Amino acid sequence: MNSYDENMHTNVGTGEDLSIAELAEMIKRVVHPSATIVYDRSKPDDAPRRLLDVSRLDKRYRISLGDGTEHTYNWLLENHATPRGVPV
């Protein structure tokens, strides 16, 4: 994104198909492995999968979704009480 200068939104992702349930399970493993995911079947149906068009990005991503989620969550745990730009 350092050299991105278009005036439109950009989907950031891997371009690989992933079900909503698979994404929920991956986040659960990182954030709270003993949690139980409960699906509310009373809500209207939505697409069970999401696949973003990432054609405007360089497809050579450097980190997997799982590793990126874990890295981001760990960063949050370490920095949540510190405002950006404020030395500790």
Image: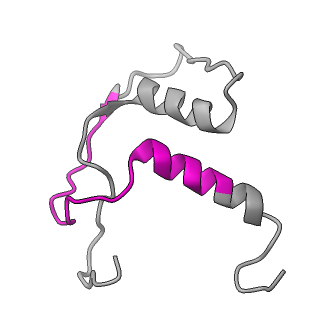
User: Where residue 16 sits: x, y (%)?
Assistant: 25, 40
Q: Quadrant of the C terminus?
A: bottom right
Rendered image quadrant of residue 87 = bottom right
Colour logic: one colour
Residue drawn at x 29%, y 65% as measured from the top left: 10
Asked whether residue 50 is drawn in magenta, I would say yes
Residue in the foreground of this view, choosing between 37 and 73: 73
- The reply, left or right, for residue 5 in relation to residue 75 is left
- Look at the image and say whether residue 66 sits in the magenta stretch: yes
- The residue drawn where x is 74% and y is 55% is 77
Nearer the observer, 82 or 40: 82
Q: Where residue 13 sits in the image (x, y, percent)?
A: 32, 53
> Measuring 69% from the left and 58% from the top, which residue is drawn there?
76
Side of 11 where 22 appears, left or right: right
Q: Residue at x 67, y 18 (%)?
A: 36
Residue located farthest toward the left when viewing the structure as drawn: 55
Please state, as top left, top right, bottom left or bottom right, where the N terminus lies in the image. bottom left
Q: Pinpoint residue 17: horizontal percent, then vertical percent.
A: 26, 35
Task: State which region is magenta.
Answer: 49-74
On the image, the x and y values in percent for residue 64 come to: 38, 48
The count of marks equals 0
Tell whether 9 sits left or right of 45: left
